[in-house]
Image (tube, helix red, strand yellow):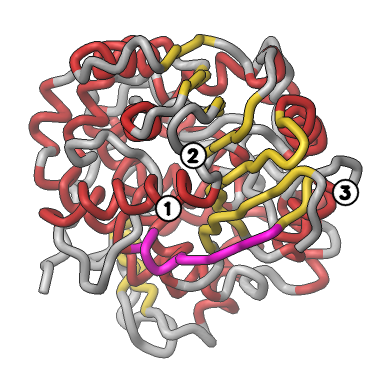
Amino acid sequence: MTVPVVPAPVRTDRVDAARWPDVAALPKASRLRTAAAERIVRHAVRSLPLRLRLAGRSRPLGLGGPLLDVHDPEAFFRRIGAGGLIGFGESYMAGEWDAPDLVAALTVLAGNAGTLVPPRLQRLRAAWAPKQPARHRNTADATRANISHHYDLSNELFALFLDETLTYSSALFRGFPAEAALLPAAQRRKIDRLLDLAEVGEGTRLLEIGTGWGELALRAAARGARVVTVTLSAEQQRLAQRRLREAGLADRATVLLRDYRKVAGVYDAVVSVEMIEAVGAEFWPEYFATLDRLLVPGGRAALQAITMPHERMLASRDTHTWIQKYIFPGGQIPSVEAVEQSTGATALRTTRRDGFGAHYAETLRLWRECFTERAEQVGELGFDETFRRMWTFYLAYSEAGFRSGYLDVQQIRLTKGETA
């Protein structure tokens, strides 16, 4: 059994205010909003299998279960009152609360996401929830900055917690619990299954949207496919090109720094792994129209996509979230229904769909444990303590989403001109 590791609390007076302005300083929030936040939290926790311990209070709140330990209740409720879930995440970054088992505590919250806020306030969400900044819209001009924010952090950072394949998406395991030593094989199994869904083989003209660090392009080229792969991350392009050269496959695969909307040509197959989440709901119809334009009649698209329940997607799609602010600007997780609606005006039809969310939870656990074990090396790369708490929260928050069933991950095959 793995013993959870709790990152050391950050002293707010040590937070780099230039890098983390909204963590270093408490937000402006009226007494009314702070009091309302406390009342909502208390009311929610009262019926949850969770313990909320507030410093200076003798008894924890809740029905029992994982502990959420609040060191500074005034700051905690003030941040939530001002920013909702963004404030909840920033409070963790500031070291104002901790949890001995962070994933377990967040899993309880994720599993009850639809009921944490009273229904009458949910109906007024548009009035109190933060709105997504206009600058994060995934237009052709803005998308590169959104992608760069995350993927151009440092190839060395990602190499510290990913496996040797440098694959940054859900693996596909043979069984649980997953072991770190088996992660490379599980990642290659996932990639091979996608390539099989798209019927990629000798001579296939393959387009990959979202290169990552090149593992899928490598495996497709090794099958004899002629690969064009596009990314908006200069860091990823550089490393993917190097890996292809070192494998002797550079003549079969071209890595372009290009927006998917600007790709030309015709292809027998398109593969895209967890890229649709970065497209933005506004642009999903354009994304699928692009796949339709690029595929030959009878062509196949094999996608791997994180999904969420449709009603939760509708409720949150206009809200600015902690993940969007700090991790993936402009991101939006689709529902299965949203994918079907977005392909409706194209000749693309779903001919297979398989979910494997439990595998993502295990993938994230392995990444998080590796990141925690190598926290000192992360620091040596220039990433401060606040960043390390942010990244720990991000990985745990994501893992909790899959463990609770709030999130799923799907492999979807779309065929041009066929029905299921």
406 lies above or below 418:
below
Work out whether residue 80 can be spotted. Answer: no
Residue type at tag 1: Arg
Which disc, if any, is residue 23?
none
Work out whether residue 1 can be spotted. Answer: yes
Residue type at tag 3: Gly
Which label's residue is closer to the chain start, 2 or 1? 1
Stretch in magenta: 351-361
Q: Check disc 3 and report the residue beneath it.
A: 344
Q: Quadrant of the N terminus?
A: bottom left
Residue 126 pos. (x, y %): 83, 49
Toward the viewer: 54 or 134? Answer: 134
Q: Which callout, 2 or 1, points to the residue nearer the camera?
A: 2
Q: Check disc 1 and report the residue beneath it.
A: 193
Q: Is mark 3 on a helix, strand or loop?
A: loop
Query: What residue lies at 56% left-to-right and 15% top-to-bottom?
Result: 145
Q: Does the magenta stretch include residue 23?
A: no
Is disc 3 in contact with disc 1, using a CB cutoff of under 8 Å?
no
Residue type at tag 2: Val
Query: What residue lies at 21% left-to-right and 72% top-to-bottom?
Result: 177
